[in-house]
Image (cartoon, rainbow, N blue to C red):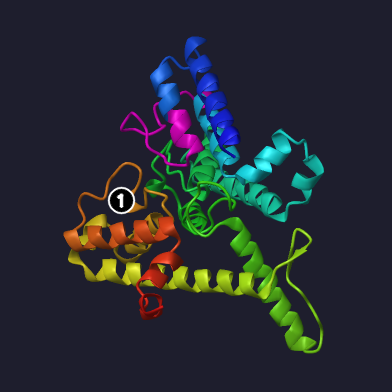
Amino acid sequence: MWKVYLAVTAAGVLVLAALGWSGLDRRMGLFDAFSYATSAVSLGGFAPHDDSARGLAPVTQWVLCGLMAVAGVNLLRLYRLAALRQVRAAARDEELRLYAVLLVVSSCVVAAELWASGAAGGPDGLRHGAFQAVSVMTTTGFATADWAEWGTVATLTLLGLMSVGACAGSASGSVKVVRHLVLFRFTRRELEQAVHPDAVLPVRVSGRVVGAQALRSVLLFALLYVLTLALGTFGLTLDAGAETGGGGVFTALGAAAACLGNVGPAFGELGPSGSYAPLGQASKAILGALMLLGRIEIVPLAVLLGRGYWRA
């Protein structure tokens, strides 16, 4: 896995540096190439410039978009695909297929909104739509434009992607695609068993049966994630400092989703062109706690704070 991670990072550095050396992006020196590549592959989102990826050439933004999309794939799957040439196994991976479909569909939805609203047209609309959809879904947080100024459809799409995440086994935050897939299959199974109570309908993902313990783990995590998001949003709306974000409850929801999913930028004044600096101290404490909970995926800390753990 380390070999795959380092190989993707090295390839990203070389490609970005080559864009600078060839004159396609004069801003991209070797230091910037290393900084952007390591940040994209780690899905971290930090940049050596305060304008994130907005000042980069379009071809560089496309390269970063590809790096983020690849980095959002399960590293073990990447190894099997690149080193072991298991193309058929990758094609049968339902999580990978759903991940690719979500990236393509969300990119098209955001791009269509940009075209319809006139915020960006032609290739620029497609580039901004694809880049932001990939950046938000992989929880990287790079930005080529201020999505806080986009239309309702694009905003809601990005808000939804904050709670999706990339594949399990990647550096992504948020819920992860495979958990959503398991939740969908479990829901469908329960609805079918409501009609046929005696039917034996195991939950399968990529042809493998998901055990009862794994199902309980996914359901517990989903419940805790939604509960934490709701409590974080409620806490932000109670703090007077949250109102400086310029959007009330929606701004609080976006900030909570962005921090719990480890995305970074949110909406309004907390978007890519703003920062969390205007928030009050209580709001910053809440968002800091949400970032910590999102990074360790809630359950370990919840267990650590429970009485049963210390008594045991």
Q: Amino acid at mark 1?
A: Leu
Q: Quadrant of the C terminus?
A: bottom left
Q: Residue at x 35, y 43 (%)?
A: 272
Q: Position of residue 158 (x, y in %)?
A: 48, 53
Q: Main secondary structure of the magenta part?
A: loop
In the rendered picture of this protein, how many numbered marks are placed on residues?
1
Q: Position of residue 65 (x, y in %)?
A: 54, 35
In the displayed structure image, the side of residue 207 where residue 60 appears, left or right:
left
Q: Residue at x 37, y 52 (%)?
A: 266
Front residue (pair 2, 186): 2
In the displayed structure image, the side of residue 25 where residue 284 appears, left or right:
left
Front residue (pair 20, 201): 201
Q: Position of residue 113 (x, y in %)?
A: 53, 48
Residue extent of the magenta highlight: 36-59
Residue wearing tag 1: 270
- Establish if 177 lies above or below 13: below
Instruction: Sort mark 1 into few (<14), some (14-19) or many (20+) by Cα contacts within 10 Å.
Output: many
